[in-house]
Image (spheres, rainbow, N blue to C red):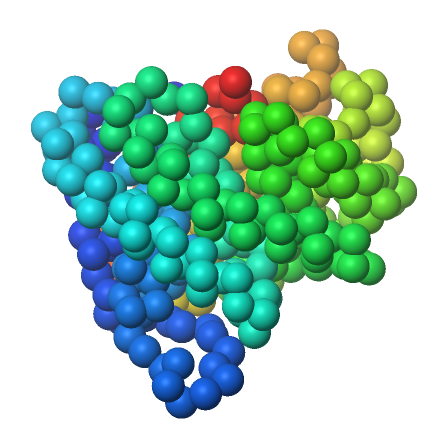
C-alpha cells in the first residue's frame, strides 16, 4: 500500500502535536532521592512528549520516515524544525546520562530501546545534512542502550511472552535488524542464539487464547516475525508448521481475525487497535518469508489485509489515548518495515 499524500500530512501533524505535548505523561521511573523528581521535559529534553518516552521515540521515527518517503509534504520544513529542536546534541547527551544511571537500567527495557534502534536505522546512511546531524546526536544514547542489551540478554533466563511492551519476540526482532544494518555481528549472533534458545522448540502455540483485553501485540505473531529473521527459509517453514499446526483453518475460521475497540477513550482498551496493526505486519512478514507456492501464503496475506484495514480506521480518532501512538503502528505496517525496505 502506498500512503496517500493527505494521509502522510495528517499523520505528520498528529505526531508533531504529540511530541511537543508534555502532559498528560506517564513516568515509570525509579527515584533514589527526592531531588530526582522532575517534570518529563527536565528528564527527557528530546523525548518528553507523546504521553511516555517510547511513544515519543517512535513518534520521531514516524516523522523521519515520512520525511524520507514524502519529501514534498507541505509540512516538511516544519518536521525538520521539530526534529532539529528535539534531536540536538545537548538533549541527547542528557538523555544518555539518564539511561546510564544504574537505577534506570530497567527503564524502557527493551521496548523503548528497540524503537530507539529503529530510529537510528532510519537515519543511518541517509544522505541528508539534517539527518546526519540528528544521527550523530543519537550516538551517545545508542551506545548506552547497546551496552544495556549486551548486559541483559545473557541474563534473561526465559522469554517474556505478553501482548504489551515487554514482549521479548518484538524486541529481539528489532535488535536483530539494528545489528544487521549497523554491522554488529556479535550483537546479531547474540540475538540469534537467544531467539533459538527461547523459541526454536516451541510447539502448538495456543493462538486461540489471544488477545487479552488490553493487548497491542500478538506475542504469537511477534515470535513468528522474529523466527523468520533468524532461520533459513526451509527451517522457518518447518518451524511454522510445528508452531501453528492448525494455522490453515485458524486463518479463516475466526480464530485469527480483526478485533474491534469498544472505547477509544480508554488508554488500555484502545490497545486493541494496535493489535490489529501488529498482526497485519507480522502476518505479511511471515507470508513474505514463505515460498511463492506455499499453501498458506495467500491466506496469510488476505488475513493481514483485513487486520490492516481494521487497524487504520482507528488512527487520528481525536482521542489522545490512541492518537499519541497509533500512527507509528500504522506506518510500520504500511511500509512493511523489516521486510521490504532494509539496506
Q: Nearer the viewer, residue 283 or 23?
A: 23
Tally of numbered tags? 0
- Residue 184 falls left or right of residue 157: left
Position of 180 with respect to 246 (left or right) is: left
Residue 259 placement (x, y as % from top left):
49, 50
* 170 with respect to 232 (left or right): left
- Front-most of residues 85 and 300: 85
- Vertical relation: 32 (above or below) 45: below
Residue sitting at 79 percent across and 21 percent down? 232
104 is higher (above) or lower (below) than 275: below
Q: Nearer the viewer, residue 302 or 323?
A: 323
Residue at x-position 19% and y-position 35%? 80
State the image quarter where residue 9 is shown.
top left
Q: Which of these two is toward me, 22 or 97?
A: 97
Location of residue 261 in the rendering, given as x and y in whole percent from the top left corner = 41, 57
Q: Is 264 on the left-hand or right-hand side of 275?
A: left
Residue at the image point whose x is 25% and y is 30% from the top? 130
Quarter placement of the N terminus: top left
Which percent across, then down, holds residue 112? 49, 54
Residue shown at the point (46%, 47%) measured from the top left? 140
Is residue 126 visible in the rendered image? The answer is yes
The image shows residue 191 at horizontal and vertical percentages of 73, 40
Residue at the extreme top of the image, as rendered: 293
Q: Is residue 252 above or below residue 208?
A: above
Residue 304 visible in the displayed image = no
Amino acid at each position: 500500500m502506498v500512503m496517500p499524500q493527505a494521509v502522510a500530512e495528517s499523520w505528520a501533524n498528529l505526531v508533531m502535536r504529540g511530541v511537543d505535548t508534555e502532559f498528560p505523561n506517564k513516568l515509570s521511573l525509579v527515584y533514589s532521592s527526592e531531588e530526582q523528581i522532575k517534570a518529563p521535559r527536565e528528564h527527557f529534553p528530546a523525548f518528553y512528549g507523546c504521553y511516555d518516552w517510547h511513544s515519543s521515540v517512535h513518534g520521531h521515527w514516524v516523522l523521519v520516515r515520512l520525511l524520507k518517503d514524502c519529501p514534498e509534504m507541505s509540512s516538511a520544513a516544519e518536521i525538520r524544525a521539530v526534529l532539529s529542536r528535539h534531536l540536538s546534541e545537548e538533549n541527547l547527551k542528557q538523555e544518555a546520562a539518564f539511561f546510564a544511571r544504574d537505577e534506570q537500567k530497567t527503564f524502557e527495557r527493551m521496548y523503548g530501546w528497540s524503537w530507539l534502534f529503529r530510529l537510528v536505522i532510519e537515519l543511518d546512511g541517509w544522505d541528508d545534512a539534517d539527518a546526519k546531524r540528528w544521527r550523530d546526536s543519537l550516538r551517545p544514547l545508542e551506545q548506552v542502550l547497546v551496552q544495556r542489551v549486551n548486559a541483559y540478554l545473557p541474563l534473561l533466563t526465559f522469554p517474556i511472552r505478553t501482548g504489551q511492551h515487554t514482549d521479548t519476540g518484538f524486541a529481539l526482532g528489532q535488535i536483530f535488524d539494528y545489528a544487521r544494518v549497523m554491522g554488529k555481528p556479535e550483537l546479531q549472533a547474540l540475538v540469534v542464539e537467544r531467539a533459538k534458545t527461547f523459541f526454536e522448540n516451541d510447539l502448538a502455540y495456543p493462538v486461540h487464547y489471544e488477545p487479552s483485553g488490553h493487548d497491542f501485540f500478538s506475542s504469537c505473531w511477534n515470535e513468528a516475525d522474529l523466527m523468520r529473521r533468524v532461520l533459513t527459509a526451509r527451517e522457518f517453514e518447518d518451524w511454522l508448521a510445528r508452531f501453528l499446526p492448525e494455522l490453515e483453518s485458524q486463518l479463516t475460521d475466526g480464530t485469527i481475525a480483526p478485533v474491534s475497540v469498544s472505547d477509544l477513550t480508554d488508554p488500555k482498551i484502545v490497545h486493541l487497535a494496535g493489535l490489529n496493526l501488529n498482526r497485519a505486519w507480522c502476518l505479511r512478514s511471515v507470508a513474505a518469508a514463505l515460498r511463492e507456492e506455499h499453501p498458506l501464503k495467500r491466506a496469510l496475506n488476505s488475513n493481514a489485509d483485513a487486520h490492516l484495514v481494521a487497524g487504520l480506521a482507528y488512527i487520528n480518532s481525536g482521542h489522545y489515548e490512541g492518537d499519541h501512538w497509533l500512527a507509528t503502528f500504522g506506518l510500520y505496517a504500511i511500509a512493511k518495515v523489516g521486510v521490504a525496505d532494509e539496506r
